[in-house]
Image (tube, rainbow, N blue to C red):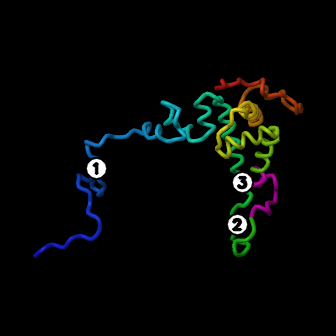
């Protein structure tokens, strides 16, 4: 009696693990993560640093290229995190107690200072007010929207990131003497990265 053929596509030949997955053959070369990362278009030009985790964002790639410092990169990442937290509160989860999921339960917080939505709004507003108009646009473009910084906007971006390092308290420089002078220039207080 002839055996019945199985339906579907036949299995690839080769040795398998106990769970049924195909083992990689010895004649296929193993591809390293660095080689895969070097082929991705947004990581090209980074050389050996293409596999670095920072290369995922435009701000991180600028830090790897030396256009911004590590502290400025951290300030931009914190600003982007504040922006995302604030955006999450604008149309947050709905309260199931109010019927059909309508109404945001955070609107009825008794002490408004303890409200997480209000805290996210105040943190992002405080950071945004530390920047001038051009710096807000350039920092949002690079840090939040992950768009490349044009050559003419690099100095504006660096000035904005320097202001954010002071506002977010990422430096130990002059923490006590900074109360009240709104025209204080932060660009001279921090080291400037090299420009390409």
Which residue is rendered at x = 52% and y = 41% of the image?
41
Q: CA distance from mark 3 to mark 1?
A: 45 Å
Which residue is rendered at x = 29% and y = 47% of the image?
24
Left/right placement of residue 21 relative to residue 90 reads left
Which residue is rendered at x = 81% and y = 52% of the image?
113
Q: Is residue 118 magenta?
A: yes
Residue behind mark 2: 94
Residue 147: image quadrant is top right
> Picture coordinates of residue 100 (x, y %)?
70, 75
Left/right placement of residue 174 relative to residue 27 reads right
Q: Is residue 87 magenta?
A: no
The reply to whether dot 3 and dot 2 touch (C-beta < 8 Å) is: no
> Picture coordinates of residue 117 (x, y %)?
75, 55
Return the mark for residue 157. none
Q: Which residues are magenta?
A: 105-119
Residue behind mark 3: 87
Residue behind mark 1: 23
SS state under label 3: helix
SS state under label 1: loop
**Location of residue 69 with respect to 58 vertically, above or below:** above
């Amino acid at each position: 009696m002839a055996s019945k053929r199985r339906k579907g596509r036949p299995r690839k030949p080769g040795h398998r693990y106990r769970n049924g997955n195909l083992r990689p053959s010895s004649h296929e070369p193993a591809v390293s993560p660095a080689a895969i990362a070097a082929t991705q278009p947004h990581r090209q030009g980074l050389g050996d640093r293409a596999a670095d985790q920072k290369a995922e964002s435009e701000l991180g790639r600028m830090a790897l290229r030396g256009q911004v410092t590590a502290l400025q990169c951290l300030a931009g990442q914190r600003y982007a995190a504040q922006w995302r937290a604030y955006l999450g509160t604008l149309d947050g989860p709905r309260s199931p107690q109010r019927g059909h999921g309508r109404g945001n339960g955070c609107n009825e917080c008794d002490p408004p200072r303890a409200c997480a939505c209000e805290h996210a709004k105040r943190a992002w507003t405080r950071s945004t007010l530390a920047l001038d108009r051009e710096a807000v646009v350039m920092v949002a473009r690079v840090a939040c929207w992950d768009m490349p910084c044009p050559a003419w906007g690099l100095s504006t971006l660096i000035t904005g990131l320097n202001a954010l390092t002071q506002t977010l308290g990422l430096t130990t420089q002059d923490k006590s003497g900074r109360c009240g002078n709104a025209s204080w220039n932060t660009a001279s207080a921090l080291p400037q990265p090299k420009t390409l």
